[in-house]
Image: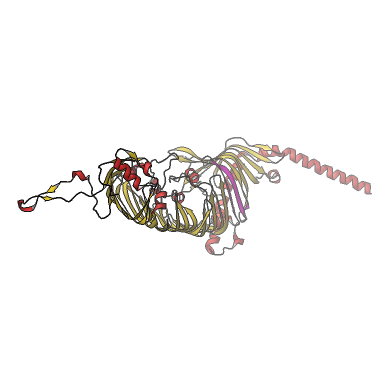
Amino acid sequence: MPSSLIRRGVWVIGVAVLVIALAVAALPLIASTRIVRDRIAWELSAWSGFRVTIDGSPRIEVWPKFRAILSDVTLSQWTETDAPPVVEAERVEVDLSAMAALQGDVAFSTARLVRPTIRVERTASGLYLPPLPSGGRITRSIDTARGVVTANPQKPDLGRLPSDPFGTVEFRDGRVVTSVGGKDTEILSSLSGQVNWAAMNSDATLMATGIWRGESVQIDFSSARPLVLFAGGVAPVTLAFKAAPATLSFDGVASMSENAYLDGQAKFAAPSLRRLLEWSQAGIAPGAAIGSVSVASKVTASAGRAKFENTTVALDNNPGMGALDFSFSEARPVISGTLAFDTLDLRSFLSAFTPITPTGEAGPGEIDTSFADKINLDLRLSAAHATAGPIQLADVAATAQVKNGLAVFDISDASAFNGNIQSSLRFDRKPDGTQVELRLLASDVDTGAFATAAGMTRLMPAGTGTVSIILKGPGKAWDSIFENADGSFSATFGPGSLNGLNLPAFLKRNEQGGFFALDDVADGSLPIDGAEIKASISKGVARLDKAEVNAQKYKIWLSGIASYSGRGLALSGGIIPNGQPAQQQPAQQQPAQQPAAGGQAPVQAPPPPKQSLFFVGGNWSTPFISPISRGVSGQ
C-alpha cells in the first residue's frame, strides 16, 4: 500500500510539473495572441490618464522575468490631438503578472522607461511641470481624496482614501524639455531614477539624478501621505537636493492646495556663493570672490511669502543669527530682515547684492548694477567685529537697501581707529547712467592709523582728528568714480605730530635753493598743536582751499591742486614763524608802498613776513620740492 501511494504521488507531481512547464512554454504564445498591443496600450492609458500609443510590436520575455518590451511609446493628452506628446520613450519595459496573462488579462507592477523625453510647461508660479492628465486611475484617486480632504481639512479620514495599486516607475537616460519659440529646449539631461508608490493610500518616494546647467544634481523626495498632498491636504514631506554648487533640504509639512504652504526646518549650504549665483543664472552679477555660505532655519511659507525664523547663517565660517522675510507678491522679490554676526566681512557679504567691489580679478572694471532690477532688499546688519578691506571695525550697525534701481549701503555707527565711523555708499541708476555717491565721516579717530589704512602715509598729521569726505560722480566704471567725482574733503587735527618731515633739514635745503626730493628730509617728526585741511573736488582734482599746520614755533601752509587720475601735485607752500600771517604769494611780489587817501604822500607798506616759500611737484609717491624765494627762515 505505501508503495502504491508513492507511485501515485510521483505521478501527481510529474503531471503538475508538466502542466507548469507547458504553461510557461505557452506564455509567449498566449501573450502574443491575447495580450495584444492594443490591450497593453489600453491598460497603460487607464492607469496614466494619457492616450498611449505603441508603434512597435510588443516583444514578450519569460526569463528571468515575465515582461513585455514595447518600442516607440508616446503618452499624449486626449483633448489636444495636435499637441506634441507629453512623454515619449524609445522603449518601455513592463513587468507582467503571469497568472493574469494566462487568464487573458494585463496586470503590471513595474514600468521602465528607457530614454524618455518629458515635455513640461512653465506655470503661473514659475515652475516647470508636465500637463496633467484629464482622467485615469491616478486622477480619479486624487479626485476621491480631494473629497475626503474637503470633508475634514484638519484631520481627513485616511481610511476612506482609494487603495488602487500604483507600483514602481523607473526611468533611465531621459531628458526634460520645454517649448521655446516652437522648438524644444532641453532643461534636464541624463535623467535617471524611480518612483516607488505601492498603493494610492501608502507612502511614496522619488529618487532622481540628472544634469542641470552642466552640473550633476540629485533629488530625493518622500511623503507618508502623498495622495493627501496631491489632493490639497496637509502631509509630511522630506526633500533633499544635492549638487556641487549647493545643497538644500527640507523636513516638515506641506500643502499643495490653492493656498499652498509649507512649514518645517530647512537647510542650505554652498561652498562658493559666487559660483552658485553664476550657476543659478539668477541675473545677479557676483562681485568679489565670495566664500562659503550656509543657512539653517525654521521656514513658514505661503503663496507669495516665506518667513525664516531662528535663522543661523555662516559666511566663511563666521556665524550669525536673525530672521528674514521673502515676499514674491510684487514685481520683484523683496528680501527684508535682520542679521547679527560675531564677525563679518562686509565687502564679501554685500558683493552678492551690491557692486561694492570690482568684478574683475585683475583690477577695477565696469560696475554692474543690474541687480537693482532683480530684487528689492532691506537688511539690518549688526556685528561685534567686522572688516571692510583693511579696516577693522567693532560694534557695527549697518543697513543694505536695494529698490527700484537704487542701492544704498549705510554704516550708521561703528567703532574704528579709537573713534567713530559713519559711511554711506549709494548707487542710483538713472537714464543718463549710474550715479555713485560716497560719504565718510570719521570722528575723533587716530588719524595716523586712519591714514595708513587709507593709503595716505605722507605728511598726514598723527593724533586725534575728524575727517569728512563727500564724493559724487558717474559710476560707469570704478576708475571713473574718482577721476570724475565732485565733492569735498575736510579734516581737523588736534595735538600730535607730523611724521616724515625733518623741518630744520627742510628749511636748510630750501634756503640753499635747487630741487630736492621730499624723501631727502623725511627722517624726522614735527610736534604740532593742530592742523586743518579743506579742499573742494571737481572732476577728480582736489583744490586746497585751506591747509594749515600749527606747530610751537612755526605755521605751515599749502595751496594748489592734487589730481587723482594722474596722481600729480601742483602745490605752493610756506613755513612762517608763529605770530605772522601766512603769505600766499612770494614776498618780492608784494607792492613796496601803498598810496594814501586824498592824494597824500604814499604810506610805506609793512615789511613782508619772514617765511620760507616753496613749490611741491611730482606725484603722490615721489614729491619733490623747489624753493620759490629766499625769505628769512627765522632760525
Using the rendered image of the protein, determine whether residue 124 is visible from the camera's viewpoint: no
Q: Is residue 521 something that shows in the picture? A: yes
Residue 121 is situated, as x and y percent measured from the top left of the image, at 47, 45
Estimate the x, y position of residue 293 in percent, counting from the top left: 52, 51
> Is residue 200 in the magenta section?
yes
Residue placed furthest toward the left: 599
Residue 332 position, x and y percent, is 40, 51
Span highlighted in magenta in the image: 198-222
Compared with 393, 182 (above or below) is above
Q: Is the magenta stretch mostly helix, strand or loop?
A: strand
- Is residue 103 or residue 620 the one in the foreground? 620
Front in this rendered view, residue 244 or 41: 244
Residue at the (88%, 46%) spot, across then down: 8
Q: Where is residue 255 in the image (x, y as percent from the top left)?
A: 52, 58
- Counting the numbered discs, the total is 0
**103 on left or right of 528:** right
Q: In this view, does 241 lie to the left or right of 596?
A: right
The picture quadrant where one finds residue 97 is: top right
